[in-house]
Image (cartoon, rainbow, N blue to C red):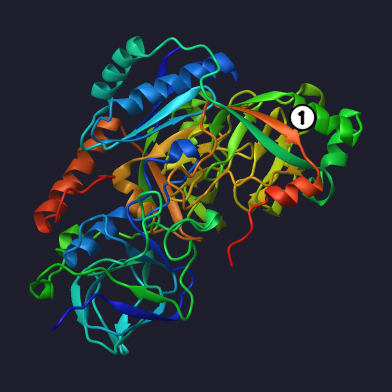
Amino acid sequence: MFRILPLGDSAITIEFGDQIDPKINARAIAFAKTVADQEWNGILDVVPTYRSVTVFFDPLQWNFSVLTNKLRTLRRLSPNVTEPNGSLHEIPVLYGGEWGPDLEAVAAFAGLTPAQVSALHASTRYRVYMLGFSPGFPYLGLVPEQMAMPRRSTPRTTVPAGSVGIADRQTGIYPTATPGGWRLIGRTPLDIYRKTGTDPFLLKPGDLVQFRPIDRKEFDRLKPRDIV
Amino acid sequence: MNHQPAHIIVVKGGWLTTVQDLGRYGYQHYGVPISGAMDSFSTRVANRLVGNSDCAAILELTLKGPELKFEQDAIVAITGADLSPAINGNSIPLWESIAIQRGSLLSFGAQRAGSRAYLAIAGGIDVPLVLGSRSTHCASQTGGLQGRPLKPGDILSGGEPGRSVNHLIGKRLSDRLLPPYRRPATLRVIPGPQRNLFSDTSLATLTEATYSVSPQSDRMGYRLTGPKVAGEGSMRFISDGTTMGALQVPPDGQPILLMADRQTTGGYPKIAVVISADLPLAAQLSPGDTVTFAPCTIAQALTVLRKHHAQLDQALPPRDTSFPSQ
Protein backbone atom coordinates (compact mmCIF):
# COMPACT_ATOMS: atom_id res chain seq x y z
CA MET A 1 0.00 0.00 0.00
CA PHE A 2 1.16 3.56 -0.75
CA ARG A 3 -1.88 5.74 -0.15
CA ILE A 4 -1.30 9.51 -0.31
CA LEU A 5 -3.71 11.67 1.69
CA PRO A 6 -3.66 15.47 2.02
CA LEU A 7 -3.44 16.70 5.61
CA GLY A 8 -4.45 20.31 4.90
CA ASP A 9 -2.50 22.49 2.46
CA SER A 10 0.95 22.02 3.97
CA ALA A 11 1.25 18.37 4.97
CA ILE A 12 0.55 14.98 3.46
CA THR A 13 0.24 11.57 5.02
CA ILE A 14 1.36 8.44 3.18
CA GLU A 15 -0.17 5.21 4.49
CA PHE A 16 1.67 1.91 4.11
CA GLY A 17 -1.03 -0.27 5.67
CA ASP A 18 -4.11 -0.41 7.85
CA GLN A 19 -2.75 -2.25 10.86
CA ILE A 20 -0.08 -2.23 13.55
CA ASP A 21 2.51 -4.57 12.09
CA PRO A 22 6.30 -4.52 12.46
CA LYS A 23 6.89 -4.99 8.71
CA ILE A 24 4.56 -2.12 7.76
CA ASN A 25 6.11 0.06 10.46
CA ALA A 26 9.64 -0.78 9.23
CA ARG A 27 8.62 0.26 5.72
CA ALA A 28 7.22 3.58 6.98
CA ILE A 29 10.33 4.33 9.05
CA ALA A 30 12.70 3.47 6.17
CA PHE A 31 10.70 5.65 3.78
CA ALA A 32 10.70 8.56 6.25
CA LYS A 33 14.48 8.29 6.50
CA THR A 34 14.84 8.24 2.70
CA VAL A 35 12.71 11.40 2.42
CA ALA A 36 14.57 13.20 5.23
CA ASP A 37 17.94 12.22 3.70
CA GLN A 38 17.10 14.17 0.51
CA GLU A 39 17.39 17.40 2.59
CA TRP A 40 15.00 19.14 0.22
CA ASN A 41 14.51 22.83 0.87
CA GLY A 42 11.10 23.58 2.33
CA ILE A 43 10.50 20.11 3.78
CA LEU A 44 9.97 20.99 7.43
CA ASP A 45 9.39 17.64 9.14
CA VAL A 46 9.11 13.97 8.21
CA VAL A 47 7.20 12.01 10.85
CA PRO A 48 6.89 8.22 10.78
CA THR A 49 4.02 6.73 12.82
CA TYR A 50 2.66 3.17 13.26
CA ARG A 51 1.80 2.61 9.61
CA SER A 52 2.23 5.98 7.90
CA VAL A 53 4.55 8.93 7.31
CA THR A 54 3.48 12.57 7.49
CA VAL A 55 5.55 15.07 5.49
CA PHE A 56 5.24 18.76 6.44
CA PHE A 57 6.21 21.23 3.71
CA ASP A 58 6.33 24.95 3.09
CA PRO A 59 3.30 25.52 0.84
CA LEU A 60 5.00 28.49 -0.84
CA GLN A 61 7.85 26.25 -2.03
CA TRP A 62 5.99 23.03 -2.76
CA ASN A 63 2.65 22.07 -4.15
CA PHE A 64 0.79 18.87 -3.55
CA SER A 65 1.21 17.31 -7.02
CA VAL A 66 4.94 18.08 -7.39
CA LEU A 67 5.64 16.65 -3.95
CA THR A 68 3.53 13.51 -4.42
CA ASN A 69 5.28 12.78 -7.74
CA LYS A 70 8.70 13.10 -6.10
CA LEU A 71 7.59 10.89 -3.21
CA ARG A 72 6.34 8.20 -5.61
CA THR A 73 9.77 8.22 -7.28
CA LEU A 74 11.51 7.99 -3.90
CA ARG A 75 9.38 5.03 -2.97
CA ARG A 76 11.00 3.08 -5.80
CA LEU A 77 14.45 4.06 -4.49
CA SER A 78 13.66 3.38 -0.82
CA PRO A 79 15.28 0.15 0.39
CA ASN A 80 12.97 -2.80 0.83
CA VAL A 81 13.68 -3.21 4.53
CA THR A 82 12.90 -6.04 6.84
CA GLU A 83 12.49 -5.39 10.52
CA PRO A 84 14.18 -4.62 12.83
CA ASN A 85 15.71 -1.38 11.64
CA GLY A 86 17.23 0.17 14.74
CA SER A 87 19.44 -0.51 17.76
CA LEU A 88 18.64 -2.53 20.89
CA HIS A 89 18.37 -0.74 24.25
CA GLU A 90 18.25 -2.37 27.66
CA ILE A 91 16.07 -0.32 30.01
CA PRO A 92 16.29 -1.09 33.75
CA VAL A 93 12.92 -0.96 35.55
CA LEU A 94 11.95 -1.10 39.20
CA TYR A 95 8.54 -2.80 39.06
CA GLY A 96 5.65 -2.29 41.50
CA GLY A 97 5.37 -0.40 44.79
CA GLU A 98 5.21 3.37 44.63
CA TRP A 99 7.10 3.15 41.31
CA GLY A 100 4.42 1.06 39.63
CA PRO A 101 1.15 1.77 41.46
CA ASP A 102 -0.99 -0.12 38.91
CA LEU A 103 1.06 -3.35 38.89
CA GLU A 104 -1.44 -5.15 41.12
CA ALA A 105 -4.41 -3.99 39.04
CA VAL A 106 -2.70 -5.23 35.86
CA ALA A 107 -1.96 -8.56 37.61
CA ALA A 108 -5.64 -8.88 38.59
CA PHE A 109 -6.64 -8.07 35.01
CA ALA A 110 -4.24 -10.70 33.64
CA GLY A 111 -5.03 -13.33 36.27
CA LEU A 112 -1.35 -13.43 37.24
CA THR A 113 0.74 -12.45 40.24
CA PRO A 114 2.52 -9.05 40.17
CA ALA A 115 5.84 -10.90 39.88
CA GLN A 116 4.58 -12.84 36.87
CA VAL A 117 3.42 -9.60 35.19
CA SER A 118 6.80 -7.92 35.61
CA ALA A 119 8.59 -11.07 34.42
CA LEU A 120 6.33 -11.28 31.37
CA HIS A 121 6.70 -7.55 30.63
CA ALA A 122 10.50 -7.84 30.87
CA SER A 123 10.77 -11.04 28.83
CA THR A 124 9.19 -9.49 25.73
CA ARG A 125 11.30 -7.58 23.22
CA TYR A 126 9.49 -4.43 22.08
CA ARG A 127 9.74 -2.33 18.98
CA VAL A 128 9.67 1.50 19.07
CA TYR A 129 6.77 1.93 16.64
CA MET A 130 6.80 5.71 16.95
CA LEU A 131 7.37 8.64 19.29
CA GLY A 132 4.52 10.98 20.17
CA PHE A 133 2.32 12.33 22.97
CA SER A 134 5.19 14.30 24.55
CA PRO A 135 8.86 14.88 23.61
CA GLY A 136 10.61 11.50 23.50
CA PHE A 137 7.60 9.34 24.52
CA PRO A 138 8.03 5.92 22.82
CA TYR A 139 5.05 3.81 21.76
CA LEU A 140 6.38 0.26 22.27
CA GLY A 141 4.68 -2.94 21.23
CA LEU A 142 3.29 -5.35 21.33
CA VAL A 143 2.41 -6.20 24.93
CA PRO A 144 1.32 -9.85 25.42
CA GLU A 145 -2.46 -10.02 24.93
CA GLN A 146 -3.07 -11.39 28.43
CA MET A 147 -1.85 -8.22 30.19
CA ALA A 148 -3.10 -5.70 27.60
CA MET A 149 -5.15 -3.66 30.07
CA PRO A 150 -6.91 -0.57 28.67
CA ARG A 151 -6.11 2.99 29.83
CA ARG A 152 -7.60 4.38 33.05
CA SER A 153 -10.92 6.09 32.37
CA THR A 154 -9.66 9.19 34.20
CA PRO A 155 -6.01 10.06 33.51
CA ARG A 156 -3.72 10.98 36.41
CA THR A 157 -2.96 14.69 36.52
CA THR A 158 0.75 13.96 36.97
CA VAL A 159 2.77 10.89 36.09
CA PRO A 160 6.40 10.99 37.31
CA ALA A 161 9.20 11.03 34.72
CA GLY A 162 10.54 7.54 34.00
CA SER A 163 7.20 5.81 34.65
CA VAL A 164 6.61 2.69 32.55
CA GLY A 165 2.99 2.11 31.60
CA ILE A 166 0.66 -0.16 29.66
CA ALA A 167 -2.27 0.85 27.46
CA ASP A 168 -3.87 -2.04 25.57
CA ARG A 169 -1.11 -3.77 23.60
CA GLN A 170 1.24 -0.79 23.90
CA THR A 171 3.79 -0.05 26.58
CA GLY A 172 5.60 3.26 26.98
CA ILE A 173 7.93 5.36 29.11
CA TYR A 174 7.03 8.89 30.29
CA PRO A 175 10.16 11.00 29.52
CA THR A 176 8.95 13.98 31.58
CA ALA A 177 6.30 14.48 34.26
CA THR A 178 3.02 14.94 32.38
CA PRO A 179 -0.64 14.00 32.86
CA GLY A 180 -1.27 10.46 31.66
CA GLY A 181 -3.79 7.63 31.60
CA TRP A 182 -1.58 4.56 31.11
CA ARG A 183 -1.43 1.79 33.78
CA LEU A 184 1.85 2.36 35.61
CA ILE A 185 3.72 -0.84 36.41
CA GLY A 186 7.24 0.44 37.15
CA ARG A 187 9.79 3.18 36.74
CA THR A 188 13.18 3.46 35.06
CA PRO A 189 16.00 5.52 36.58
CA LEU A 190 17.24 6.28 33.04
CA ASP A 191 16.72 9.74 31.62
CA ILE A 192 15.37 9.02 28.12
CA TYR A 193 15.02 12.75 27.22
CA ARG A 194 18.10 14.81 28.04
CA LYS A 195 17.03 18.34 27.22
CA THR A 196 20.51 19.79 27.24
CA GLY A 197 22.36 17.05 25.39
CA THR A 198 23.45 17.07 21.76
CA ASP A 199 21.44 13.87 21.11
CA PRO A 200 18.54 14.40 23.50
CA PHE A 201 16.45 11.37 22.57
CA LEU A 202 17.63 7.92 23.62
CA LEU A 203 15.04 6.01 21.59
CA LYS A 204 14.43 6.39 17.87
CA PRO A 205 11.67 5.01 15.65
CA GLY A 206 12.51 1.40 14.74
CA ASP A 207 14.75 0.75 17.79
CA LEU A 208 14.20 -2.28 20.03
CA VAL A 209 13.72 -2.21 23.79
CA GLN A 210 14.27 -4.94 26.36
CA PHE A 211 13.29 -4.13 29.96
CA ARG A 212 15.45 -5.50 32.80
CA PRO A 213 13.97 -5.81 36.31
CA ILE A 214 16.09 -4.13 38.98
CA ASP A 215 15.81 -3.68 42.76
CA ARG A 216 15.59 -0.52 44.82
CA LYS A 217 19.34 -0.47 45.48
CA GLU A 218 20.20 -0.53 41.78
CA PHE A 219 17.48 2.04 41.03
CA ASP A 220 19.03 4.47 43.52
CA ARG A 221 22.50 3.79 42.16
CA LEU A 222 21.46 4.41 38.52
CA LYS A 223 19.25 7.41 39.21
CA PRO A 224 21.14 10.54 38.15
CA ARG A 225 21.47 12.96 41.04
CA ASP A 226 19.71 16.28 40.57
CA ILE A 227 22.29 18.98 40.10
CA VAL A 228 21.76 21.52 42.87
CA MET B 1 17.42 57.42 21.11
CA ASN B 2 20.19 55.06 22.02
CA HIS B 3 19.07 51.47 21.69
CA GLN B 4 20.83 49.04 23.96
CA PRO B 5 19.61 45.45 24.09
CA ALA B 6 16.25 45.62 25.89
CA HIS B 7 16.09 44.88 29.60
CA ILE B 8 12.52 44.39 30.76
CA ILE B 9 11.21 43.62 34.23
CA VAL B 10 7.97 41.68 34.46
CA VAL B 11 5.74 43.42 37.05
CA LYS B 12 2.67 41.29 36.33
CA GLY B 13 2.69 38.17 34.19
CA GLY B 14 -0.80 38.54 32.71
CA TRP B 15 -3.11 35.57 32.20
CA LEU B 16 -0.78 33.56 29.93
CA THR B 17 2.23 35.34 28.47
CA THR B 18 4.84 33.19 26.76
CA VAL B 19 7.91 33.61 24.58
CA GLN B 20 7.21 32.20 21.10
CA ASP B 21 8.62 32.21 17.59
CA LEU B 22 7.46 30.55 14.36
CA GLY B 23 7.76 27.08 15.88
CA ARG B 24 10.04 24.17 16.66
CA TYR B 25 10.33 22.27 13.39
CA GLY B 26 12.57 19.27 12.79
CA TYR B 27 11.84 17.16 15.88
CA GLN B 28 8.28 15.95 15.42
CA HIS B 29 9.55 12.42 14.74
CA TYR B 30 10.79 12.47 18.36
CA GLY B 31 7.35 13.54 19.57
CA VAL B 32 8.29 17.20 20.03
CA PRO B 33 5.28 19.47 19.39
CA ILE B 34 5.77 22.43 17.03
CA SER B 35 4.31 24.95 19.54
CA GLY B 36 5.24 28.50 18.41
CA ALA B 37 3.01 31.54 18.04
CA MET B 38 -0.67 30.66 17.54
CA ASP B 39 -1.03 33.61 15.12
CA SER B 40 1.89 33.58 12.66
CA PHE B 41 0.55 36.59 10.69
CA SER B 42 0.52 38.91 13.72
CA THR B 43 3.95 37.57 14.71
CA ARG B 44 5.44 38.34 11.30
CA VAL B 45 3.92 41.82 11.19
CA ALA B 46 5.12 42.67 14.72
CA ASN B 47 8.65 41.51 13.91
CA ARG B 48 8.79 43.34 10.56
CA LEU B 49 7.54 46.58 12.14
CA VAL B 50 10.55 46.63 14.48
CA GLY B 51 13.10 45.51 11.89
CA ASN B 52 13.44 41.92 13.15
CA SER B 53 13.64 38.78 11.10
CA ASP B 54 10.31 36.90 10.95
CA CYS B 55 11.62 34.15 13.20
CA ALA B 56 12.74 36.42 16.08
CA ALA B 57 11.17 35.58 19.45
CA ILE B 58 8.16 37.66 20.53
CA LEU B 59 5.76 37.58 23.48
CA GLU B 60 2.32 36.04 23.01
CA LEU B 61 -0.23 37.67 25.35
CA THR B 62 -3.53 35.97 26.09
CA LEU B 63 -6.78 37.81 27.00
CA LYS B 64 -5.22 39.75 29.86
CA GLY B 65 -1.82 41.27 29.14
CA PRO B 66 1.18 41.65 31.47
CA GLU B 67 2.77 44.75 33.00
CA LEU B 68 6.29 45.33 31.78
CA LYS B 69 8.80 47.89 32.98
CA PHE B 70 11.37 48.95 30.36
CA GLU B 71 14.82 49.61 31.83
CA GLN B 72 16.17 50.76 28.46
CA ASP B 73 14.83 52.69 25.49
CA ALA B 74 13.21 50.28 23.06
CA ILE B 75 11.18 50.09 19.87
CA VAL B 76 8.20 47.78 20.05
CA ALA B 77 5.14 46.81 18.03
CA ILE B 78 1.95 45.19 19.29
CA THR B 79 -0.25 43.29 16.85
CA GLY B 80 -3.15 40.84 16.92
CA ALA B 81 -5.80 41.18 19.62
CA ASP B 82 -6.70 44.59 21.03
CA LEU B 83 -5.98 44.18 24.74
CA SER B 84 -5.94 47.98 25.31
CA PRO B 85 -2.18 48.55 25.49
CA ALA B 86 -0.91 51.70 27.22
CA ILE B 87 2.43 53.29 28.06
CA ASN B 88 2.41 54.98 31.47
CA GLY B 89 -1.39 54.90 31.27
CA ASN B 90 -1.67 56.48 27.80
CA SER B 91 -3.20 54.27 25.12
CA ILE B 92 -1.01 53.33 22.22
CA PRO B 93 -2.03 52.06 18.77
CA LEU B 94 -1.74 48.50 17.54
CA TRP B 95 0.00 47.41 14.31
CA GLU B 96 2.51 50.29 14.58
CA SER B 97 6.16 50.76 15.61
CA ILE B 98 6.38 52.67 18.87
CA ALA B 99 9.30 54.13 20.80
CA ILE B 100 9.34 53.35 24.52
CA GLN B 101 11.57 55.38 26.80
CA ARG B 102 13.52 53.84 29.64
CA GLY B 103 11.58 53.75 32.88
CA SER B 104 8.22 53.42 31.11
CA LEU B 105 5.55 50.93 32.10
CA LEU B 106 3.74 49.03 29.36
CA SER B 107 0.39 47.73 30.60
CA PHE B 108 -2.80 46.30 29.16
CA GLY B 109 -6.49 46.63 29.95
CA ALA B 110 -9.78 45.40 28.57
CA GLN B 111 -9.95 42.80 25.81
CA ARG B 112 -11.65 44.63 22.92
CA ALA B 113 -11.12 42.35 19.90
CA GLY B 114 -9.37 39.03 19.34
CA SER B 115 -7.73 36.92 22.04
CA ARG B 116 -3.98 36.92 21.54
CA ALA B 117 -1.73 39.93 21.15
CA TYR B 118 1.90 39.84 20.01
CA LEU B 119 4.62 42.08 21.36
CA ALA B 120 7.81 42.34 19.32
CA ILE B 121 10.85 44.24 20.55
CA ALA B 122 13.59 45.46 18.19
CA GLY B 123 16.38 42.91 18.59
CA GLY B 124 14.02 40.11 19.63
CA ILE B 125 13.83 38.38 22.98
CA ASP B 126 16.97 36.61 24.01
CA VAL B 127 16.21 33.19 25.46
CA PRO B 128 18.28 30.08 24.64
CA LEU B 129 17.49 28.10 21.51
CA VAL B 130 16.14 24.70 22.55
CA LEU B 131 15.98 22.17 19.70
CA GLY B 132 16.30 25.02 17.23
CA SER B 133 13.54 27.27 18.56
CA ARG B 134 12.80 29.79 21.31
CA SER B 135 9.13 28.78 21.56
CA THR B 136 7.69 27.83 24.93
CA HIS B 137 5.89 24.50 25.21
CA CYS B 138 4.55 24.66 28.76
CA ALA B 139 3.25 21.06 28.95
CA SER B 140 6.78 19.65 28.51
CA GLN B 141 8.56 22.63 30.12
CA THR B 142 10.53 23.12 26.89
CA GLY B 143 11.95 26.38 25.51
CA GLY B 144 11.10 30.02 26.17
CA LEU B 145 11.78 31.33 29.65
CA GLN B 146 12.41 28.13 31.66
CA GLY B 147 9.61 26.42 29.74
CA ARG B 148 6.86 28.39 31.48
CA PRO B 149 4.72 31.55 31.23
CA LEU B 150 6.09 34.87 32.51
CA LYS B 151 5.66 35.67 36.19
CA PRO B 152 6.36 38.74 38.33
CA GLY B 153 10.07 39.33 38.87
CA ASP B 154 11.19 37.74 35.60
CA ILE B 155 13.70 39.71 33.61
CA LEU B 156 13.66 39.60 29.82
CA SER B 157 16.74 40.47 27.84
CA GLY B 158 16.59 41.59 24.27
CA GLY B 159 18.96 40.83 21.46
CA GLU B 160 20.98 43.53 19.74
CA PRO B 161 18.59 45.63 17.59
CA GLY B 162 19.48 46.26 13.97
CA ARG B 163 22.05 49.04 13.42
CA SER B 164 19.48 51.70 12.82
CA VAL B 165 15.89 51.21 13.91
CA ASN B 166 14.88 54.81 14.68
CA HIS B 167 13.54 55.30 11.14
CA LEU B 168 10.99 52.57 11.87
CA ILE B 169 9.14 54.63 14.51
CA GLY B 170 5.59 55.31 13.38
CA LYS B 171 5.65 52.72 10.61
CA ARG B 172 2.32 50.88 10.52
CA LEU B 173 0.48 48.15 8.65
CA SER B 174 -1.99 49.44 6.09
CA ASP B 175 -5.59 49.27 7.35
CA ARG B 176 -6.70 47.19 4.38
CA LEU B 177 -4.42 44.34 5.53
CA LEU B 178 -5.80 44.24 9.08
CA PRO B 179 -7.39 40.84 9.79
CA PRO B 180 -11.16 40.82 10.52
CA TYR B 181 -11.92 39.54 14.03
CA ARG B 182 -15.69 39.26 13.45
CA ARG B 183 -17.90 36.64 15.11
CA PRO B 184 -18.80 34.10 14.06
CA ALA B 185 -15.37 33.69 12.54
CA THR B 186 -15.37 31.89 9.19
CA LEU B 187 -12.56 29.40 8.64
CA ARG B 188 -12.10 27.66 5.31
CA VAL B 189 -11.47 23.89 5.41
CA ILE B 190 -10.07 21.22 3.10
CA PRO B 191 -11.48 17.67 3.47
CA GLY B 192 -9.25 15.78 5.92
CA PRO B 193 -7.28 12.55 5.43
CA GLN B 194 -10.05 10.47 7.09
CA ARG B 195 -12.89 12.27 5.35
CA ASN B 196 -14.05 8.87 4.03
CA LEU B 197 -14.79 7.66 7.55
CA PHE B 198 -17.55 10.30 7.68
CA SER B 199 -20.82 10.52 5.76
CA ASP B 200 -21.61 13.36 3.36
CA THR B 201 -24.24 14.44 5.89
CA SER B 202 -21.56 14.79 8.57
CA LEU B 203 -19.36 16.93 6.32
CA ALA B 204 -22.43 19.03 5.43
CA THR B 205 -23.21 19.46 9.15
CA LEU B 206 -19.68 20.66 9.81
CA THR B 207 -19.80 23.27 7.06
CA GLU B 208 -23.36 24.49 7.67
CA ALA B 209 -23.64 24.66 11.47
CA THR B 210 -22.24 27.26 13.84
CA TYR B 211 -19.94 25.93 16.58
CA SER B 212 -18.84 27.60 19.74
CA VAL B 213 -15.44 27.38 21.40
CA SER B 214 -15.86 25.61 24.76
CA PRO B 215 -14.08 26.53 28.00
CA GLN B 216 -11.94 23.37 27.55
CA SER B 217 -9.78 25.14 25.00
CA ASP B 218 -6.16 26.16 25.11
CA ARG B 219 -3.04 26.40 22.95
CA MET B 220 -3.23 22.65 22.35
CA GLY B 221 -6.68 22.74 20.82
CA TYR B 222 -10.22 24.05 20.97
CA ARG B 223 -13.06 21.76 21.93
CA LEU B 224 -16.04 22.87 19.87
CA THR B 225 -19.68 22.45 20.84
CA GLY B 226 -22.49 22.26 18.32
CA PRO B 227 -24.25 19.70 16.14
CA LYS B 228 -22.63 16.26 16.32
CA VAL B 229 -20.43 15.07 13.48
CA ALA B 230 -20.96 11.31 13.43
CA GLY B 231 -18.43 8.89 12.04
CA GLU B 232 -19.22 5.74 10.10
CA GLY B 233 -18.72 2.35 11.67
CA SER B 234 -16.59 1.85 14.74
CA MET B 235 -14.31 4.89 14.19
CA ARG B 236 -11.39 2.76 15.34
CA PHE B 237 -8.35 4.42 13.97
CA ILE B 238 -4.58 3.95 14.40
CA SER B 239 -2.81 7.08 15.70
CA ASP B 240 -1.04 9.04 12.98
CA GLY B 241 0.46 12.49 12.30
CA THR B 242 -1.52 15.60 13.21
CA THR B 243 -1.25 19.21 12.07
CA MET B 244 -2.35 22.61 13.33
CA GLY B 245 -5.84 23.29 11.98
CA ALA B 246 -6.90 19.64 11.86
CA LEU B 247 -10.49 19.06 13.00
CA GLN B 248 -10.44 15.70 14.75
CA VAL B 249 -13.60 13.99 15.86
CA PRO B 250 -13.66 11.94 19.10
CA PRO B 251 -16.45 9.39 19.67
CA ASP B 252 -18.77 12.06 21.17
CA GLY B 253 -18.99 13.74 17.74
CA GLN B 254 -17.88 17.17 19.00
CA PRO B 255 -14.92 18.29 16.85
CA ILE B 256 -11.61 19.43 18.33
CA LEU B 257 -9.61 22.02 16.39
CA LEU B 258 -5.91 21.26 16.93
CA MET B 259 -3.72 24.29 17.54
CA ALA B 260 -0.03 25.17 18.06
CA ASP B 261 0.75 22.99 21.12
CA ARG B 262 -0.97 19.88 19.74
CA GLN B 263 0.63 16.47 20.21
CA THR B 264 2.50 15.26 17.14
CA THR B 265 0.32 12.15 16.82
CA GLY B 266 -3.33 11.50 17.54
CA GLY B 267 -5.82 8.68 17.38
CA TYR B 268 -9.01 10.48 16.36
CA PRO B 269 -9.97 10.67 12.68
CA LYS B 270 -9.58 14.08 11.03
CA ILE B 271 -12.64 15.10 9.04
CA ALA B 272 -11.23 18.39 7.73
CA VAL B 273 -8.27 20.76 8.05
CA VAL B 274 -8.40 24.56 8.30
CA ILE B 275 -6.36 26.22 5.53
CA SER B 276 -3.04 27.84 6.52
CA ALA B 277 -4.22 31.31 5.48
CA ASP B 278 -7.08 31.19 8.03
CA LEU B 279 -5.11 29.81 11.00
CA PRO B 280 -4.25 33.34 12.22
CA LEU B 281 -8.01 33.96 12.52
CA ALA B 282 -8.48 30.67 14.40
CA ALA B 283 -5.69 31.78 16.76
CA GLN B 284 -7.78 34.79 17.81
CA LEU B 285 -10.69 32.68 19.11
CA SER B 286 -11.31 32.07 22.79
CA PRO B 287 -13.97 30.29 24.87
CA GLY B 288 -17.48 31.55 24.05
CA ASP B 289 -16.61 32.69 20.52
CA THR B 290 -18.54 31.27 17.57
CA VAL B 291 -17.08 29.84 14.38
CA THR B 292 -18.29 28.42 11.07
CA PHE B 293 -16.41 26.31 8.52
CA ALA B 294 -16.56 26.91 4.75
CA PRO B 295 -15.52 24.26 2.20
CA CYS B 296 -12.41 25.00 0.14
CA THR B 297 -9.97 23.22 -2.21
CA ILE B 298 -6.20 22.90 -1.81
CA ALA B 299 -5.72 25.04 -4.95
CA GLN B 300 -7.91 27.82 -3.50
CA ALA B 301 -6.08 27.56 -0.16
CA LEU B 302 -2.71 28.07 -1.85
CA THR B 303 -3.99 30.98 -3.94
CA VAL B 304 -5.19 32.77 -0.80
CA LEU B 305 -1.97 32.03 1.08
CA ARG B 306 0.23 33.32 -1.77
CA LYS B 307 -1.89 36.46 -2.01
CA HIS B 308 -1.60 37.11 1.74
CA HIS B 309 2.17 36.69 1.67
CA ALA B 310 2.59 38.86 -1.45
CA GLN B 311 0.49 41.66 0.08
CA LEU B 312 2.41 41.52 3.34
CA ASP B 313 5.81 41.42 1.59
CA GLN B 314 4.82 44.47 -0.43
CA ALA B 315 3.59 46.42 2.59
CA LEU B 316 6.38 45.35 4.94
CA PRO B 317 9.28 43.60 3.19
CA PRO B 318 10.86 40.80 5.24
CA ARG B 319 14.34 41.38 6.63
CA ASP B 320 15.38 37.95 5.38
CA THR B 321 13.75 34.80 4.10
CA SER B 322 10.51 34.16 5.90
CA PHE B 323 10.77 30.53 6.81
CA PRO B 324 8.60 28.61 7.34
CA SER B 325 5.82 30.36 5.43
CA GLN B 326 2.72 29.00 7.11
Question: Which residue is pictured at 73% across the width and 24% down the height?
Answer: A124
How far from the left and from the top, in percent, is residue B323? 24, 46
On-image quarter of the C terminus of chain A: bottom right
Q: What element carries label 1?
A: helix
The kind of residue on which mark 1 rests is His
Q: How many marks?
A: 1
Q: Which of B80 and A211 is in front in this view?
A: A211
Q: Mark 1 points at which residue?
A: A121
Quadrant position of residue A18? top right
Residue B326 vs residue B98: left or right?
Answer: right
Q: Residue at x 73, y 40 (%)?
A: A93
Examine the rendering and report whether any part of residue B214 can be seen: no
**On the rendered structure, is B288 left or right of B316?**
right
Q: Please state which of residues B213 and A186 is positioned toward the viewer in this rendering.
A: A186
- Circle 1 residues within 10 Å: few <14, some 14–19, many ≥20: many
User: Seen in the image, is B280 located left or right of residue A194?
Assistant: left
Observer-nearest residue: B281 or B314? B314
* Horizontal arrangement in the rendering, residue B115 relative to residue A212 (left or right): left
Chain assignment, label 1: A
Task: Give residue B85's quadrant in the image.
Answer: bottom left
Image coords of residue A213 (percent x, y): 77, 36
Q: Is residue B10 visible?
A: yes
Which percent across, then down, holds residue A45?
37, 36
Task: Pick the residue in front: B64 or A108.
Answer: A108
